[in-house]
Amino acid sequence: MPKPPDQFAALAGALARRRPDLAGAALAPLPDAGLAHDHIRLAGTDLLLRVPKQSQRGYAAADNLAYQAACFERVAASGHGPTLHAVLPPEDALPMGALLVGFVAGRPPRLPDDLAALAEAMAAVHALPMPPVGERPPLEDHADPVADALAEIEDQARYLDSPEVPADTRAQIAEELAWARGYAAGTDSRAQPRSLVLTDTHPGNFLVRTDGRAVIVDLEKALYGAPAIDLAHASVYTSTTWDVATAAELSVVEVAGFYRSYLAAVGADRAARLTPTLVPLRRLLLLRALTWCALWRVEHRAEIGGWSAAHSDPALIAHVAERTRHYLDPARVRRLRGEWLDPPGLHSLLG
């Protein structure tokens, strides 16, 4: 969606104050591809401005910017994230501020061919040393990833009673919720491996460079938690078909191959500890995705929660509306659940 001239003037002024060497750089907006940010290229440079439209965590503008800056700084250490170059603080004419980050030259991942590259990127991020507890803020620290995931799901599940959710879908999600509550009550997820995780790992958030290296370019949700959530989000149907540029429906065999690529990259000991968590956290991730679809459809229609159509290109809003409707279709939900309910299940393929 074209941005008003005063936003570009505010960006140009803030950029000149923070980076005088870039004063006068031409600002070239990229196509509107996400609900949470505008992306603006600095012509003739290898730099990009990320301008928040909202905070998906509900943070105040300065806190939101600080959180995202920490995400970029920490993930960059893996070699699979853009470099943070400057923070443009919020001001009256630029109320959410902006980040100046490195522009990644690359193409969208091709699935299933690039699954191994995505697995390698996530393995590198997950291998970064966990800082001492006191040094983890401002990033969230999920000491019990299952309990924290379930809490988010339960909060979003408030929207399931809406007419936006078919009754059959509501019943299936209720069955998954019952399973999730039982799993959370019967497992101590504090004992499973934890690391810096990316959280929003759908393939459209990656680019693949000419050397084959995958780079994660959307980092606003990184936190300390369960690696299995990242793996699930990268390969579940609601993610692999979310972005038009990367859309593909993976077979269960291809999903298992993706997991095996990751497990080979992290070593036998860590792989042995992670394997029992892969399918259960995949089920939790799907629940999180489906309940978010219900949330978005309700809040967007009511123009609340930061999902106003005024923030994004109408074509993007139409795409999200179509995708969320599709994912909540009862037949689609039944097919997605088949990964663990119908033979041969993912469990058997992972061993």
Image: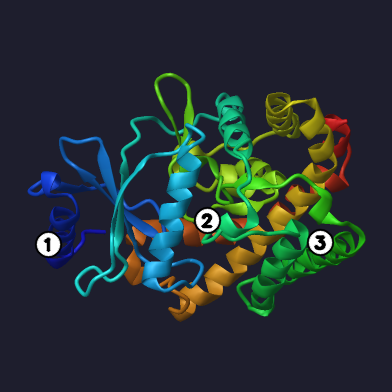
Of circles 3 and 1, the one toward us is 1
User: Residue type at mark 3?
Assistant: Glu
Quarter the N terminus occupies? bottom left
Tell me which label, 2 or 1, sits earlier in the chain: 1
Cα distance in 3D space between marks 3 and 1 = 49 Å
Q: Nearer the viewer, residue 101 or 128?
A: 128
Q: Earlier in the sequence, mark 3 or mark 2?
A: 3
Residue 2 image position (x, y, % from top left) = 21, 59
Question: Which secondary structure, mark 2?
Answer: loop
The answer to whether the residue labelled 2 contacts the one labelled 1, judged by CB atoms less than 8 Å apart, is: no
Q: Nearer the viewer, residue 174 or 306?
A: 306
Residues marked 3 and 1 touching at CB (< 8 Å) = no
Give me the disc on residue 9: 1
Q: Is residue 55 above or below residue 49?
A: below
- SS assignment at label 3: helix
Q: CA distance from mark 2 to mark 1?
A: 28 Å
- Residue at image coords 56%, 55%: 135
Quickly name the residue at label 2: 221
Horizontal and vertical percent for residue 53? 35, 65
What residue is disc 3 on?
Answer: 176
